[in-house]
Image (tube, helix red, strand yellow):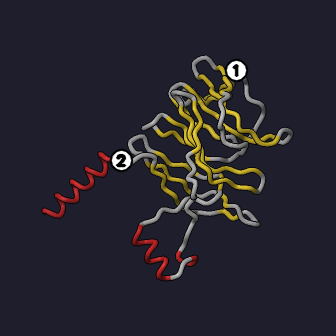
Amino acid sequence: MISYNIKRNQWEKYKMYGDIPSVRSSCSAIIWKDLIVVFGGFEQANGYYNNLYFFETKTLTWTEIIKPNAPSPRDRCSCWIDYSQNKMMVFGGMVDDKHFCDLHSFDLDFLIWDDLTPNNQIKELSRNDLKKSEYQNFVKNREYKWPPPSGGHVVCSSLETHYIVLFSGSKQTINRKYINSIYVFQSLPDINQDLLKFSQETILRDI
């Protein structure tokens, strides 16, 4: 564990305690209060991991969190915090050339894993995949696309909304295609924002 002190322009390596994770690469991590939460990763000798660790920044202590229903071992998955529910979200990831599109949450208050993947995943669709009539019906009904099996995304989040944006990454194909798609995930209906939007639109129409 190495930190960079901005004021002193200096790197510092810490002595760590507790259940120190084994050597690994391509793990995913989030920062929650005084914790750094690390999930998954890969190591040449032991393969892929799905273990979860808490690192307490005040005590420099690692703790392995062993709970049932964790996602399968993988690396390069996307992790972010849903601040509205105090949950860490885990999407996608890779094992060799196999990619995933499952979505999991870990409750940071009660330490519980939950699989949020829909039973009937909505396949990625494009205009080229559909007949004209099907495409028009698709747009009219505003069906939502579930992201394809992929890993290595860039995650953009906001403290003020329930929206998460996934950008880019690699897609499971014969030669591993790299993509520049954008997917937006909304964890909860945002009633306040919807009411505000409706109110603003009404005022604009009145003007």
Residue for point 59% across, 30% down: 36
* Picture coordinates of residue 42, whole percent (x, y): 76, 42
Q: Is residue 79 visible?
A: no
Q: Is mark 1 on a helix, strand or loop?
A: loop
Per the model, the C-alpha gap separating discs 1 and 2 is 41 Å
Q: In which quarter of the image is the C terminus?
A: bottom left
> In this rendering, would 104 be left or right of 192?
right
Residue 119's tag is none
> In this rendering, would 82 be left or right of 60?
left
Give the vertical position of 51 relative to 163 (above or below): above
Number of other residues with Cα within 10 Å of mark 2, as a class: few under 14, some 14 to 19, many 20 or more: few
> In this rendering, would 43 be left or right of 120?
right
Between residue 5 and residue 129, name the one nearer to us. 129
Between residue 132 and residue 152, name the one nearer to us. 132
Q: Is residue 163 visible?
A: yes
* Picture coordinates of residue 22, whole percent (x, y): 77, 31
Give the vertical position of 56 relative to 117 (above or below): above
Exactly how many numbered labels are in the figure?
2
* Picture coordinates of residue 77, whole percent (x, y): 64, 47
Residue for point 72% across, 65% down: 173
Cβ atoms under marks 1 and 2 closer than 8 Å: no
Residue 190's tag is 2
Between disc 1 and disc 2, the foreground one is: 2
Residue at the right extreme of this rendering: 45
Residue for point 57% across, 58% down: 120
Amino acid type, mark 2: Asp
* Picture coordinates of residue 111, whole percent (x, y): 57, 29
Number of other residues with Cα within 10 Å of mark 1, as a class: few under 14, some 14 to 19, many 20 or more: some
Amino acid type, mark 1: Met
Residue labelled with disc 1: 16
